[in-house]
């Protein structure tokens, strides 16, 4: 009954989307995606286990076995939605193609010209390749050095469409540097394309390494989606015409993503019934990279990734094997009190590189890590370098759901501050912001 009502609402939204904005279609499809995921997960979960796609929930008393890679279901539904979506978004141009010729009459948000279709299809292609990579990783547990650069290949269609349709490769110079450099912008040329490819590598991987607590992979993606949508809403209500189109496009891709992810979150949140797998992490990260690149606000999008960027920088000593990196860096579960404690890297069997020991002590001094010494004063372990462990070092042991909520709250607060600073400082630094709002100018 509950799902029936949701579906009825979704169909009504799809109906009014024809005469109003495609944002109604986006919301309708988000609801359909949510209902489909919620219906499918309990039905397909056992089949995943049957073919060997399962994992042990390491932070539970009996380490129950749960279906793994359920993110593949979520990504598939999203991709179906993006295909069904096409007639709704491009409706007016399909029934009356000549309107495209007079684009001045058609700046009303929600009806995209055919030119946008190439961007849209390149986004779908990129996401499909990413999902394939994620599934391959979940099936074969690819090595980090192999899988790390593969998302850059998935980004190629986006970069080509960006080159043909937009092609802007310059970055603005902050006001105080204008006199010094003697220009208002710098053209980065091919470096800008390399930067966008790097974003395609970073976003998927960064979500995958901020993981290991029930609900965190999907939770952080939901928070990122909310932040991106808040930013889109600012532009759609107060932005210039060109920014309205980019941010409308962004909202159209993110709203259904939010719907399918919410459906997955219901099953992955503590106590998890399913795991999302690397498929979801790559797919979710790539959705944000695609939206940032095609919406021409990749730098702002990266600002929303500040927690993931900090987690990556903090993780570097372990990722580059300066400090040993265990296969799993997720927190340590204590069966006696049911709480999670900081997990540790053993420094006896595989000591850290000598030059790094003072850095470890420095980090310890500033409470950015916890070190353990034996009775003779030799270093025997350090806490794993992830934001998850750091949260436990700072706030003490806690239950898994509390830990997840704490990290998501911190991420959300950082994101809100970022949105404010982006527009307040952006206007102050560059003397210009796409938002036509006096408080930011
Ligand atoms: C990344 C992290 C790894 C972390 C893992 C958890 C790096 C370099 N890698 O590895 O430290 O342990 O994600 O996802 O930072 N699991 C749980 N509870 C959860 C989520 C996962 O117990 O809430 C366990 C399950 O056994 C699951 C497995 O983690 O099967 C999934 O690990 P996988 O995604 O394959 O690890 P990586 O992405 O390689
Ligand atoms: Mg993973």
Image (cartoon, grey):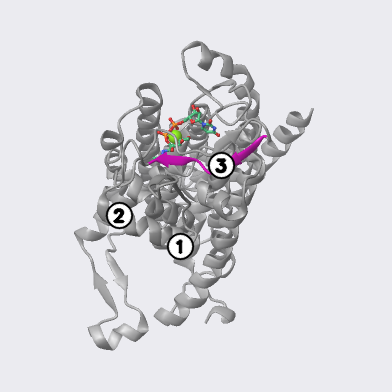
Disc 2 residue crowd, few under 14, some 14–19, many 20+, Cα 10 Å:
few
Chain-order first, disc 1 or disc 2: 2
Q: Residue at x 31, y 59 (%)?
A: 166
Image height check: is 262 above or below 313? above
Numbered disc in front, either 2 or 3: 2
Is tag 2's residue or tag 3's residue first in the polypeptide sequence? 3
Decide: few, some or many residues near mark 1? Use Cα within 10 Å; few <14, some 14-19, many ≥20.
Answer: few
Measuring from the top left, give residue 366's x and y in whole percent.
47, 63
Left or right of 324? Residue 112 is right
Furthest toward the bottom, the residue is 179
User: Which is nearer the N-term, disc 1 or disc 3?
Assistant: 3
Instruction: Quickly name the residue at label 1.
Output: 365
User: Residue at the location (57% across, 38% down)?
Assistant: 261
SS type, badge 1: helix
**Which is nearer the eye, 441 or 332?**
332
Q: Residues within 10 Å of mark 3 (few under 14, many from 20)?
A: many
At 45% from the left and 58% from the top, the residue drawn is 364
The reply to whether the magenta stretch includes residue 344 is: yes
In the depicted structure, whether residue 24 falls above or below residue 440: above
Residue situated in front as seen by the camera: 278 or 370: 370
Depth order, front residue of 55/172: 55
Q: Which residues are magenta?
A: 338-346
Task: Compute the Cα span from label 1 to label 3.
Answer: 29 Å
Q: Give percent across and percent down for residue 205.
A: 39, 43
Q: Which residue is mark 2?
A: 356
Image: 36 above or below 192: above
**In the image, residue 2 lies in the stretch drawn in magenta:** no
Mark 3 residue's CB less than 8 Å from ligand 1: yes
Kindly state the secondary structure of the residue where label 2 is placed: helix
């Amino acid at each position: 009954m509950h799902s029936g009502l949701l579906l009825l609402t979704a169909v009504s939204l799809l109906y009014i989307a024809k005469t109003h904005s495609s944002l109604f279609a986006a919301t309708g499809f988000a609801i359909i995606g949510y209902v489909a995921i919620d219906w499918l997960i309990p039905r397909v979960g056992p089949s995943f286990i049957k073919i060997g796609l399962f994992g042990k929930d390491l932070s539970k008393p009996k380490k129950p076995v749960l279906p793994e890679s359920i993110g593949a279901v979520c990504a598939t539904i999203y991709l179906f939605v993006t295909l069904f979506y096409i007639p709704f978004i491009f409706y007016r141009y399909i029934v009356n193609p000549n309107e495209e010729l007079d684009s001045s009459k058609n700046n009303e948000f929600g009806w995209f010209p055919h030119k946008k279709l190439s961007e849209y299809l390149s986004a779908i292609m990129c996401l499909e390749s990413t999902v394939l990579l994620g599934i391959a990783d979940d099936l074969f547990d690819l090595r980090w050095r192999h899988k790390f650069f593969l998302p850059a290949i998935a980004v190629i269609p986006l970069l080509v469409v960006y080159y043909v349709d937009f092609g802007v490769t310059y970055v603005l110079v902050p006001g105080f540097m204008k006199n010094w450099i003697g220009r208002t912008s710098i053209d980065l040329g091919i470096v800008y394309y390399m930067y966008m490819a790097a974003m395609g590598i970073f976003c998927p991987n960064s979500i995958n390494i901020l993981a290991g607590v029930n609900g965190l992979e999907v939770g952080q993606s939901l928070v990122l989606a909310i932040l991106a949508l808040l930013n889109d809403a600012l532009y759609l209500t107060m932005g210039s015409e060109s920014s309205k189109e980019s941010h409308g496009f962004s909202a159209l891709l993110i709203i259904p993503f939010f719907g399918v992810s919410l459906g997955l979150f219901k099953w992955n949140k503590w106590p998890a019934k399913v795991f999302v797998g690397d498929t979801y992490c790559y797919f979710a990260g790539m959705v944000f990279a695609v939206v940032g690149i095609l919406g021409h606000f990749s730098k702002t999008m990266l600002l929303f990734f500040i927690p993931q960027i900090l987690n990556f920088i903090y993780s570097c000593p372990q990722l580059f094997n300066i400090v040993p990196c265990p296969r799993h860096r997720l927190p340590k579960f204590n069966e006696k009190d049911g709480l999670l404690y900081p997990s540790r890297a053993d420094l006896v069997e595989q000591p850290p590189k000598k030059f790094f020991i003072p850095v470890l002590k420095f980090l310890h001094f500033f409470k950015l890590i916890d070190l353990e010494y034996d009775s003779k004063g030799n270093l025997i372990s350090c806490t794993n370098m992830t934001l998850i462990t750091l949260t436990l070092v700072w706030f003490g042991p806690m239950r898994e759901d509390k830990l997840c909520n704490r990290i998501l709250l911190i991420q959300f607060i950082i994101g809100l501050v970022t949105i404010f600073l982006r527009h307040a400082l952006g206007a102050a630094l560059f003397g210009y912001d796409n938002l036509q709002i006096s408080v930011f100018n």
